[in-house]
Amino acid sequence: MLSRVAQNIYWMTRYVERAEDTARLINVNTNLLLDLPRTTTFGWLPLIFIVGAEKLFFEKDPYRLADETNVVKFLISDREHPGSIISSLAAARENLRTTRDTVPQEAWEQINGLYIYARDHTPSRRGRYEFLRRVIHGAQQIGGLLAGTMTRTAAYDFVRLGHYLERADMTTRILDVRSANLLSHASQTQTQTSMQTQAPIPATREEQDPFESIQWMSVLKSLSAYQVYRQQVRVRVNGPDVLKFLLQDEYFPRAVAFCLRQLDICLRKLPRHEAALAALAALQQTLNAATVPDLAREGLHDFIDEVQIGLGELHGQIAAAYFAH
Amino acid sequence: MTIEWQHYAASGSYYDELIASGTGPRPAARALCEYLASLSDQELHERKTAAELAILVMGITFTVYTEGGSIDRAWPFDIVPRIIPKHEWDRAEAGLKQRVQALNLFIDDLYHEQKIIRDGVFPAEVLAQSVNFRPQCVGVSPRYGVWAHICGSDLVRDKDGTIYVLEDNLRVPSGVSYMLENRVVTKRVFPELFGHQRIQPVDDYTLRLYDMLASLSPRPGDHPTVVVLTPGIYNSAYFEHSYLAQQMGVELVEGNDLEVGDDDCVYMRTIEGLERVDVIYRRIDDLFLDSEVFRPDSTLGVKGLMRAWRKGNVALANAPGAGVADDKVVYAFVPQIIKYYLDQDPLISNVPSYLCMRETDRNHVLANLDKLVVKPANESGGYGMLVGPHATPAERKRFAELIPKDPRNYIAQPTLALSTSPTLCDDRMEPRHVDLRPFILSGPTTYVTTGGLTRVALKKGSLVVNSSQGGGSKDTWIVGTEGL
């Protein structure tokens, strides 16, 4: 299999997954916003940091307001932002265009159709949920089509490598939204109480608790994980257990550990996998060694950073082995 | 009964491929014409829709350049086949083999001793001003002495039915995938017609192409690595590149998938590492092949490719430099070239041509710009031409200025009364002008496609058949007529 074709297929599925997970990311933040008391004016700015695009976002205008309108527009329809939903779908489409003979014709039609839908619809605040739902479903259909029609040769391994690597990365980013809001929540509590401009926020642990479980529930829901979590974990929704589930569960397909296991299976089928497998093993070890209840209290953001660096390292090894130019 | 062939408006001033004026359908076309006449309007319309749908679903496209970027368009196709009787085709086939054989000997001679020039048959100054002669190829001896492995020669028919060669495409001729797909579509639309007639199959082209390419491999072995080299998705023939690669089961590569190693061999980058490439069917023009030798700014090709080819470590089809014979001035000399190398008379005629480099010819051309077709020596796709009788005075004036400035670059031919073939236009059968591009493969043996790609000018009265300029195509049937 040609390196270029492998590379294009890998990026095609990464971009499809990125579009889907960006939609999920916006959903989780929207839901958090709705669930929190009005007094906590936590922002949309954390999303910009979470997708790692702060430089780009403020490049043109350092005083650009990171409010809902601007951030959502940046994440959905900004062509200059390579990680926006529209840019991701356009990039997926371009990558597929050059490899149309390797993937089933229907996949091309599906990606093309989803791109055209996203291009022709700029969602209003009210239409946003429906728009994001269609993006998520469209991406799921593409995954289903490829799984149902592609022959299991190396090309399909690259489809899966792209999917799971991107998904692992984005699941950690979605968790990061939660951690960012915990932090901003805490700091806002301080500043706001000190400024005394608004009604004091409930400060004790017990008072915050009801909000906490609601927030973790919306994280689970945004990853289609709520049902499974309830069935499998069987305790009331709480931070440490949700984190443990989404990071370390080996059976739920959006959990990081599951994604890493799939990457392991794909890589073992490919030639010249030694360095990539070593990077993967190191990452798995980091993940397994984490004591999640502690992370729930503090250090989640740093831990997620560490996982993301590991995923970056893994991507680098895959690129070096198979795409190297 | 909707088509009454006696009312088909075949004008007496053109040869019609299916209908003889006055006497109705020609023998080889009789079964088809009777069948078409038996269909109702509705049925005929349904067949047309079915063909359009098949083309859409099969994704047969060609790319058109516009200012807003390039777009894939569905391939314009007419469902009424063009028919050539087998005995007539056999003669044309023999003529094409003769012609390509002589052209390959000619190219090989130009890159070696140039005997044809020393013997005074071919003028040295024509070669000196050839834009497609590549000094970098001098002294190279491709296997079998073949340079133009794939040739597409355009055939036309004049008013009296004589077949002429209009031009030879020896660089990167395209269109063969459409020939193959047209047959697939026609079989879907008119399956009942194939049962009762001796319509010769065309499907073995890609097998023949693969065998020919494999025979060029520098490493003897059962499974040489053959690849198709494309400039990429923005090329107008990208559909064909990917189609041929798929049909032959070989990789479709771009320039940066390949590299030339320290051992001067060509390798492609795969997920397993570097894999040696033996034969490259290149669909990139000479000048973009190798930035080390040709255009230094080209990123489409492979640096060092010419080095590898000259050393015999990789085969290129067509060989670089083969285009030297793809020049309308050289075209005018083909009858002499055939005579010189094969000591035979040409089996298919050339269209009589005036060479503007000759003073008497030039004066004649300048005095008759309103009657002649003027062609630049090295353009393809119907660009840069003057069709005298259809041109405006301003266009003629421009050519009257262009020709004396660069006489070597222009030839002129009488305006041919290109033959017509019945074509379904708005659900009516009307005559439209056609040509034919057969493809000739040269390796250890020579193979000619059964028929070729019939291109049709869909606009009424138009003589331009190029798909980039409003042309479409038809399936081409070679039909046995013994006993008809």
Image: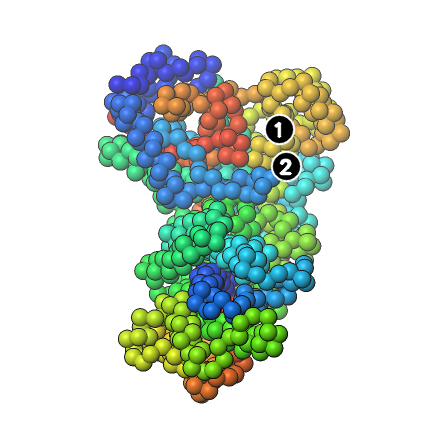
Q: Is residue B15 visible?
A: yes
Secondary structure of residue under mark 2 = loop
Determine which residue is flagged by label 1: B385
Q: Are marks 2 and 1 in contact (CB under 8 Å)?
A: no
Residue visible at 45% across and 53% down? A126
Q: Quadrant of the N terminus of chain B?
A: top left
- The percent coordinates of residue B175 (x first, y second) are 47, 40
Q: Looking at the picture, which amino acid does disc 2 mark?
A: Asn
Mark 1, other Cα within 10 Å: few <14 / some 14–19 / many ≥20: some
Residue visible at 55% across and 26% down? B351
Q: Nearer the viewer, residue B3 or B278?
A: B3
Residue visible at 42% across and 56% down? A129
Task: Say which quarter of the image contains residue A234.
Answer: bottom left
Q: Residue furthest right?
A: B405
Q: Chain of mark 2?
A: B
**A274 sits left or right of B366 in the view:** left
Determine which residue is flagged by label 2: B378
Q: Chain of mark 1?
A: B
Q: Quadrant of the C terminus of chain B?
A: top left
Question: Is the residue A219 above or below the residue B79 in the image?
Answer: below
Work out how far the residue at label 2 is from the one at label 1, CA to CA, in angstroms: 11 Å
Residue visible at 56% across and 70% down? A198
